[in-house]
Amino acid sequence: MNKLPNPRKNKNNFFFTLWLIFHLGIVAAFLLVFAFSRDKLKLETDLFNLIPKSLSLESVRKADEKMLSKTSRNVFILVANRDFQSAKNVAENIFEELNSSENFESVSLYNDMAFISDITDFLFKYRWNMLDQKTIDSINSDGGDSFALGALSKAYSGFTMLPLDNLELDPFLLAEHNFSSYLSSVQKSGTAMSLVDGVLASQYEGEWYIMIRAVLSKKGSALASKKNGVSEIYSACRRFENLNGDSREKTHFIYSGVPYHSSQSSNAAAREISIIATISMLAVIAILILVFKSPKPVIFSAGSILISIVAAFLATISVFREMHIITLVFGTSLIGSCIDYSLHYFIHWAGSLSLKTGSDIRAKLLPELSMAICSTGICFAVLLFAPFAILKQMSLFCLTGLLSSFLTTIAIYPKIKTPAGERKLPLADKFRFFVDRAQNKTVGRITITALFVFSIASIIVFHGNIRIKNNILSLYKMQGKLLDDEITAGKIIKYNPSGWYIVGGETEQQALENEENFRHAFEEKTSGKAGYMSTSLFIPSIEQQKKSRYASEKLLKLAAHQLQSLGYEKKFTEKLKADFEQSAGDFISFAAGNVPEFITSSISSVWIGEVEGKYYSVLLPNSVEDYEFFRSIADGFEDVHFVSKSADVSRDLDKLTVMVIKFFVAAYILMLIMLRFFYSWKQSLKIISVPLLIVLVTVAVFGIAKINLEFFSVTGLILVFGLGLDYIIYMIENEKSIEKEKILEPFATMLSFVTTGISFGALALSSFQPVRLIGLSIFIGLTTAYLSSFFYARDNGSAQDYR
């Protein structure tokens, strides 16, 4: 006789197969991506890669990213000492040590015009092409008489910067004039440091500061590494700090540049990951040991958390090819969220007499756990559509982790043998004593009403503090020595390019022409007082070079008289004209490959080049103080885009905050539809009213504390929406339990709140503002949700309210 199939065993096999497919699928996807991905999978640590991309045009955005990839790796070291020679000696030692390191693309100390011969040769060769617009206009207006006379005066004065070796081929001193313009452009576009004994130096408040400039290589900018460029700088400087015995003559260092702050923030984030994860895990383990007094729930719960975090990590890095370290910081909150499912299972496993087997426990919990994972999953899934990579990473990380924990609970836990003999939880009995006295309809309705009244009254009173306002500068607050260093460096260097113009064109020449047109408008609007760096200052467009040659041709009409005045015979006039005609088709351009290395290096931060079929350059002001004024200069220029990261990103975060609020409304509607499948309209509306209370209380607390509703705090509200509804669902489903076991679900929900509250409460203590705001808003929301569910439990309605 054939045995009948065991439906429980078949169901166990089904759920286990589902669990296996889910986790093996994630591992397989990771291995495939790891094996075939051209780009290395990486853990991103750069603070500024957190911010959303503010430029809507894809090619312009990529041009901006390309420019930032260069400038964001710039570092400055100011070697300070009251004695100039002492400071210079230390600077030379540090330069020698860093200059040979693979952590740096370039290290600069000496500015003794080592390339002077290259510069002069280049400017002499292209002397006809390099005249600035002001000189061109002057020559065109009077035929070049004033310019020629000025050249004669300078030649006979003997005060020239360049030797007069080629005077017969340059009687108008065009190379000298262009060299002077070149130096003026370099001085206006750079820092306030001056050339002293071959190095850039400045004296401030009785001390000499000597500048070392460096650009980190890709290897050196890997801030997750302990052997990166920033660490090497600190190590090299530490050996020379306080070198001299006299306190008045001690050498010290000023550090300035984005990589120093990114390094500090990433190190702080790494520390927080270990601290938050350790505290959360220890707290959860302590609670499990205290409640169950058995190793099995502790071991399996810890194992479930570990599996969830690994699965979440592999899934996120497979999809995005990278993961920001802040995603891991936030991901530690999974410890509290994932433990919810384990707690609900093991509370019944240890305390329920009516549920004899693991399959019975699963059958009892499956409806409520399914609704809980759906409610939380909808909220996380909605955020996957946000146009913000870090938010997508957080959402996918948490969604994957929660699904993993859910599947472990329904597929693996039922295989654990239930305890033999009497099953009880002493702490649950003590909790029953508290619940029986605190939980009743009257107290519940008074409490819920009080929360509504408190939040609405607070919002009315403190409405002036409640506003959607983002400030990207609050993402990271400088403090300690780095803050002092940046303040000092700002006073000494006087260089703060916090905004810039991206100029585009269909071709290289069109980009340069557009930049030249914009340069003239920029100089006019700023009255020529604002220093700036741009490509066309050093490499004019071919059109501009033609204008220069046209003006030079006018000078040639004066060549015979000019050469005669300088003492040359008439035959040199023909030689000069022949030289001009010979260079007629020789124009400087990147396409022609005749731009010398010293110029390419000098303009590397502003010439972007080709990006997706267009060409881009950057006009980089030394300092931007009035953002709206500088932005207005670009009005009317179709191919000019003003970029100010702090202002632009803050504005875009305001827009994203409004978008997230719309996501909240969408999740709210989806949740109401889902609830309607399980409950009556009356019950569904009661349940869905709790998220409204969560929002009101959170907004009220933020208003009282004078905290703006920023993007990250509003995002936290969406996440707490799903997490908070779980508590109410558990309480409602608990009404279906037998009377003597009705305490188990409230007890499990209380433990869930405590463990999740610990996780997000720890995030609220983070020094990193986005994580702190998300943690704070979720903690406030979860507390409100739990209080609502606790007092709401005895007012769930009648049996006909369930569908």
Image (cartoon, grey):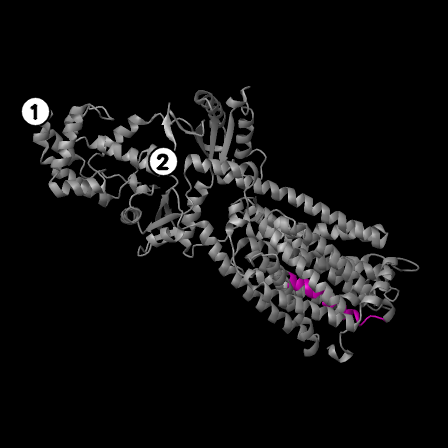
Q: Is 273 placed left or right of 197 in the picture?
A: right
The part of the chain drawn in magenta is 720-738
Whole-percent x, y for residue 604 in the image: 38, 39
Look at label 1 and name its amino acid.
Glu
Q: Which residue is mark 1?
A: 569
Q: Residue furthest top?
A: 245
* The stretch drawn in magenta includes residue 82: no
Name the residue: 10% across, 24% down. 568
Check the image and name the residue furthest to the bottom. 800
For mark 2, what is the residue?
602
Query: What amino acid is at disc 2?
Result: Ser
Instruction: Assess whether residue 722 is covered by the magenta stretch.
Output: yes
Q: Is residue 615 left or right of residue 168?
A: right
> Where, quadrant-wise, is the C terminus in this rendering?
bottom right
Disc on res. 735: none
**Inter-mark Cα distance, 1 to 2:** 40 Å
Query: Does residue 86 sit above or below 745 in this rendering?
Result: above
Q: Is residue 345 visible?
A: yes
**Are the residues flagged by discs 1 and 2 in contact, CB closer than 8 Å?**
no
Number of other residues with Cα within 10 Å of mark 1, as a class: few under 14, some 14 to 19, many 20 or more = few
Can residue 29 be seen from the camera position used here? no
Q: Nearer the viewer, residue 241 or 757?
A: 241
- The part of the image, by quadrant, that contains residue 269 is top right
